[in-house]
Amino acid sequence: MTKDREKTIRTKSIDLDNYKKGEASFSSTLEMSPKTFIGKITAARHAILEIMGEKKERIFVGEDEVIIGRTPDCDIQLLVENVSRRHARIIYKSEEYQVEDLGSTNGVYVNGIKVERCILRQHDIIEIGGVKIQFIEEKIGQDHDLK
Amino acid sequence: MTSSNNTNKMYITFWGTRGSVSTPGRITEKYGGNTPCVSVSCQDIRVIFDAGTGIRNLGMELLGEIKEKENPPSLHLFLSHTHWDHIQGLPFFMPSYHKNTKLTIYGSPYKGGFLESILKEQMDSEYFPVSMSAFPADIKIREISEEIIRLGPLIIEWQEQVHHPGGSVRYRVNFNGKKVVYATDVELNNIFNEKENSEENRRLGREYIGFITDADLLIADGQYTEDEYPDKVGWGHSSIPVLLDTAFRSNVKQVAIFHHDPQHSDKFIDELWIKNRAIYRSKSRKMDLFWAREGLTLAI
């Protein structure tokens, strides 16, 4: 985590029961604040990771690497049994966002396809241990009051 | 080409998926507008299929490895054929401009010794400002003579495909019990055609099925929809239903539909995917299918 990166404030537990899929049962929780910013966010370059479910949670990411996993040191902590300790990362490279599997047990899926790495496009659905996350990219030039 | 370094896997990356002509723009951003280029990275071997415009981005990524490493990975470019959309990126492949690069280019032996001249003519001063002989890299151009090619732990097999104007070659990479097939630019509708059930077609059909059977990943030409195909007969490309039906019958595990028609927008392809995935999800055996998109890496 870089020095200037904001600490993710985990203030709210979200019941992930609505992620029940097939035989998997996710009775654990996602720990995340209602509106979270990871790293330095600018109007010119940021994207939103929307945790899908009954209560959609929006996480704003900038150009810093974002680690997703089960352990508390991850930028996005998913307390779900099928999520590996350090499961995946979102990186910003060559002006594009990518998701990358960090050697997880259950893999990373983008729109249902198991991927090792994938450049993300608008409204792609990333699936990590059964948790679905929608990628939403805000285009350059759009001005937002981010905080 | 990926940060992953599991030596027991092949990493397949799509750099260009569009057929016929590069098609940049907002409506092709998701699946990509660059023409064919696919890489297979395994240990210190980098296999590249085709040199469409997608090879430019691959080159930019490889250049880092070539500059940084004392023993850079060896590059092996296998051309399916020499139509524009499969070679036009080669002059923009930056590793060719670096003296540390060792690149071998392979192609069909049935071009009458013309593979080297075709590639060089593309860089004639009438078409391009830099001649191929000016590349500082160590580049060898080989018309394939042996049945199989061994590159470190990889075994590459190949077969000629006659149902494409001028012909084309399909390749199969074997590693650690896994098979990845690259079979683009072939009109399967001509081979698997009940109206032309000739002995020659039956032989070609058996060859094709034998080549793709049990593939872990089949990257294959599916340029046209069933409705579009009748107006494109003889153009050397397959319709999606014929491709998928043949792959399913051949016990293919995953199909990457490739060589997208320039007229097919992201929205159109998304709709094709939803429709066809539903068809094959309802079948007795699981076969994953997706439309190949630029910037996607799979581990096999």
Image (tube, coloured by chain):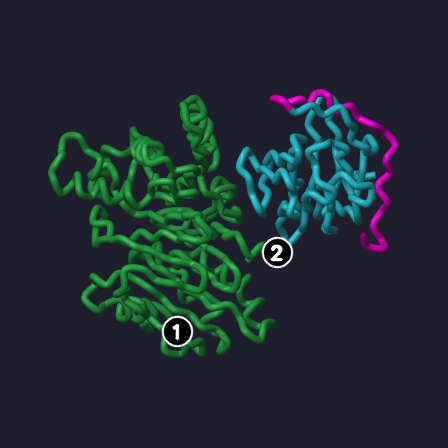
Closer to the chain start, of discs 2 and 1, is: 2
Q: Are marks 2 and 1 on the same chain?
A: yes
Placement of A146 over or under B172, stated as above or below: above
Q: Which mark is residue B218?
A: none
- Give the residue at mark 1: B139
Quadrant, the C terminus of chain A? top right
- Span highlighted in magenta in the image: A1-23
Q: How many marks?
A: 2
Q: Quadrant of residue A120?
A: top right
Placement of A145 over or under B141, stated as above or below: above
Mark 2 against mark 1, which lies toward the viewer?
Answer: 2
In the rendered structure, the colour chosen for chain A is cyan
Which residue is at 33% across, 64% downward?
B106
- The chain under label 2 reads B
Seen in the image, is A45 located left or right of residue B274? right
Badge 2: residue crowd in 10 Å (few <14, some 14–19, many ≥20): few
Which residue is at 82% across, 30% downward?
A34
Badge 1: residue crowd in 10 Å (few <14, some 14–19, many ≥20): some
Residue A93 belongs to magenta span: no
In the rendered structure, the colour chosen for chain B is green
State the residue in front, B108 or B225: B108
Which residue is at 61% across, 40% downward?
A107
